[in-house]
């Protein structure tokens, strides 16, 4: 949060990333600077294809940056990728659950991947099933779960290793309003417990509800960052939608396109 004295859990300076295409090298991130204080939520907003998913990919060690420095929970992404991976959890746009397994089996599998002991893994599984209201469905194949239940299980799997930093890449896309609000409550609970969250979202009301800080990505750079109230005051509006439109108007700069992002939905 701007003005916060908390230590930074995410520090990004001069991040650059380009992709090669038939027409040549295509820059997507062109000098991104971003700081996220520990124990807060920062919402990363931007038009479809602006580089949000690429940013998450670099910060979570899934993609290599072309230039710049990134530190997550005090660890350099380029030099200490294993330490970064041990400190983070990632929930992507597509659920990573195995639909042939039960909810319990999915969580136990994650516990094994995190090298938890058998007793600790079973205890963690029970705790997370209870926390996300999935106890009754725990023994059923995930293929029988609703979309909201799958998303809750996906987030629960992200939390098996008790990460200090969690990346949520459009976690509520396609969910009904009730399921969205359930996930919002979980995000608030995580932050109350000290977890740091970087959230990308297509829903501006979601950013307004959850974020301590909003960062707008456009033209390969962060063009504004502040609390929702600060950004609205700076643009003399009561709507984050108006702020977003003002900052991402085509006349304000040339947008880049991120080939890792989909065009299924527009920001609303």
Image (cartoon, grey):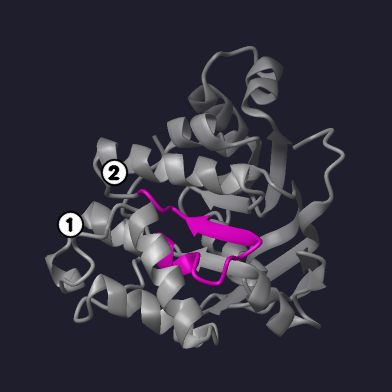
Residue at point 39%, 70% (across, down): 125
The residue indicated by pointer 1 is 146
Residue at point 62%, 33% (across, down): 247
Magenta part of the chain: 154-172
Mark 1 and mark 2: Cα distance apart in space = 10 Å
Residue at point 55%, 49% (across, down): 190
Residue 129 horizontal/vertical position (percent) = 34, 61
Q: Which secondary structure lies at badge 2?
A: helix
Evaluate whether residue 138 shows in this view: yes
The residue indicated by pointer 2 is 179
Q: On the rendered structure, is 100 left or right of 254?
A: left
Residue at point 59%, 75% (across, down): 19
Q: On the rendered structure, is 107 left or right of 195?
A: left
The answer to whether residue 45 is above or below residue 159 is above
Q: Does the magenta stretch include residue 212?
A: no
Return the residue nearer the eye: 117 or 183: 117
Pick whichever of labels 1 and 2 is earlier in the sequence: 1
The reply to whether discs 1 and 2 touch (Cβ–Cβ < 8 Å) is yes
Q: On the rendered structure, is 178 left or right of 32?
A: left
Return the residue nearer the eye: 38 or 47: 38
Return the residue nearer the eye: 29 or 251: 29
Residue 64 horizontal/vertical position (percent) = 67, 79
Residue 44 horizontal/vertical position (percent) = 59, 47
The answer to whether residue 233 is above or below residue 83 is above
Q: Does the magenta stretch include residue 168?
A: yes
Q: On the rendered structure, is 96 left or right of 253?
A: left
Question: Would you call the spot at circle 2 few (<14 residues within 10 Å), some (14-19), or many (20 or more)?
Answer: some
Residue 205 in which image quadrant: top left
> Quadrant where the C terminus lies?
top left
Residue 16 horizontal/vertical position (percent) = 73, 66
């Amino acid at each position: 949060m701007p003005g916060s004295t908390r230590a930074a859990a995410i520090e990004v300076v001069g991040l650059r990333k380009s992709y090669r295409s038939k027409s040549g090298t295509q820059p997507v991130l062109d000098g991104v600077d971003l700081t996220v204080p520990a124990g807060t939520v920062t919402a990363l907003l931007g038009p479809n294809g602006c580089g949000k998913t690429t940013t998450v990919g670099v910060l979570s060690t899934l993609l290599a940056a072309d230039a710049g420095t990134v530190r997550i929970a005090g660890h350099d992404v380029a030099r200490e990728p294993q330490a970064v991976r041990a400190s983070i959890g990632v929930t992507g746009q597509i659920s990573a659950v195995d639909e042939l397994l039960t909810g319990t089996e999915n969580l136990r599998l994650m516990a094994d991947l995190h090298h938890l002991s058998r007793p600790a893994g079973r205890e963690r599984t029970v705790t997370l099933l209870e926390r996300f209201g999935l106890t009754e469905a725990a023994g059923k194949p995930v293929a029988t779960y609703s979309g909201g239940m799958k998303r809750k299980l996906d987030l629960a799997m992200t939390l098996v290793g008790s990460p200090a930093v969690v990346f949520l890449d459009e976690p509520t896309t396609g969910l009904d309003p009730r399921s969205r609000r359930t996930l919002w409550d979980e995000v608030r609970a995580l932050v109350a417990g000290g977890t740091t969250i970087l959230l990308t979202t297509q829903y501006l009301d979601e950013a307004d509800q959850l974020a301590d800080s909003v960062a707008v990505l456009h033209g390969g750079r962060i063009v504004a960052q502040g609390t929702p109230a600060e950004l609205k005051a700076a643009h003399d509006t009561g709507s984050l939608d108006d702020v977003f439109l003002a900052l991402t108007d085509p006349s304000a700069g040339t947008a880049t396109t991120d080939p890792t992002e989909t065009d299924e939905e527009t920001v609303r």
